[in-house]
Image (spheres, helix red, strand yellow):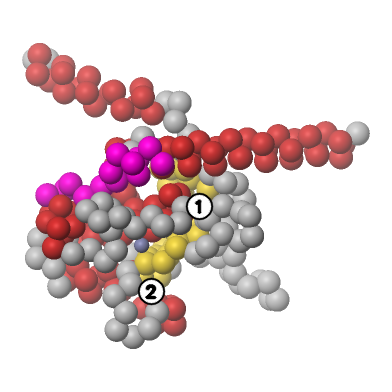
Amino acid sequence: MTRHTFWFLSMLALPTVQAAGTPAITVHLFDLAGVPDAVLAPSIEIATRLYADAGVPLRWVRQAPPVAKPGQGTSFRAAVTPTAVSLRLLPKHVSDRLIRPGSTKLGIAYPAVENDYRYLASVFYDRVELAAAALDDVSLPVLLGHIMAHELGHLLLGPGAHARETIMACPWDTNEFRFVKRGRLGFDKRQRALLRSQVAARDKAAESVAGTRQQAAVHGGA
Ligand SMILES: [Zn+2]
């Protein structure tokens, strides 16, 4: 092993060590659009890297599309805990129902229910495909990865998250596309700090929910 290789490996190992104490967010992924693995796998990798750069580990869990229960509708909530969110990749016929014709929206993040944490976001996969096809030098996996990261950002950063020249820009203009082509569109320093504190707060809330459940189980068993 050369000295250079050693340094390179040491640098690779560093983020893992630093991330050990950082709470992770579990992303339950519902791919209703049937995105090919050759597109989805690199997209997930890009979104994961953007959050790792902010000090937030993402853990992805692929979920089968839920089955609607009569009278109850369909739930995309795979786990009721503040540290779990759900991301849906929607096909054209669903996107058409949710967005107006001519809209340039590529995704949506839903508000929290009552005092709960925001947990559900959708990406309009057919619209992302069209947008990527119209762009020079930005591939479909790169665009999809960034849009997934943007919508997850809405869930984790809270209201008023849009900010120019960052992954949270909306809509993207020439600057953002220039940054994305260079692989430099991400969260800025303020967003990274906010993400870490919001995720820590979710983690604390998840622990207290788990503690309450455990107490309830003990009392229930007594
Ligand atoms: Zn947005």
Alpha carbon separation for disc pair 2 and 1: 20 Å
Quadrant position of residue 108: bottom left
Percent coordinates x, y for residue 182 in the rendering: 12, 49
Task: From this view, report whether residue 183 is shown above or below residue 98.
Answer: above
Percent coordinates x, y for residue 190 in the rendering: 33, 41
Q: Is residue 188 magenta?
A: yes
> Toward the viewer: 62 or 128?
128
User: Which quadrant contains ligand 1?
Assistant: bottom left
Q: Amino acid at mark 2?
A: Pro
- Residue 187: mark: none
- Disc 2 secondary structure class: loop
Percent coordinates x, y for residue 219 in the rendering: 86, 36
Question: What residue is disc 2 on?
Answer: 91
Split into 4 quadrants, where in the image is the C terminus?
top right
Residue found at x 60% / y 46%: 81
Direction from residue 90 to residue 81 in the image, left or right:
right
- Disc 1 secondary structure class: strand
Residue found at x 9% / y 18%: 4
In magenta, the rendered stretch is 182-194
Task: From this view, report whether residue 210 is shown above or below residue 39.
Answer: above
Q: Amino acid at mark 1?
A: Val
Direction from residue 214 to residue 31 in the image, left or right:
left
Q: Residue furthest right?
A: 222
Quadrant position of residue 75: bottom right
- Can residue 42 be seen at all in this image of the molecule? no
Percent coordinates x, y for residue 168 in the rendering: 31, 55
Q: Is residue 210 magenta?
A: no
Split into 4 quadrants, where in the image is the N terminus?
top left
Residue found at x 31% / y 27%: 15
Q: How crowded is the residue under tag 1: few (<14 C-alpha within 10 Å), some, or many (20+)?
A: many
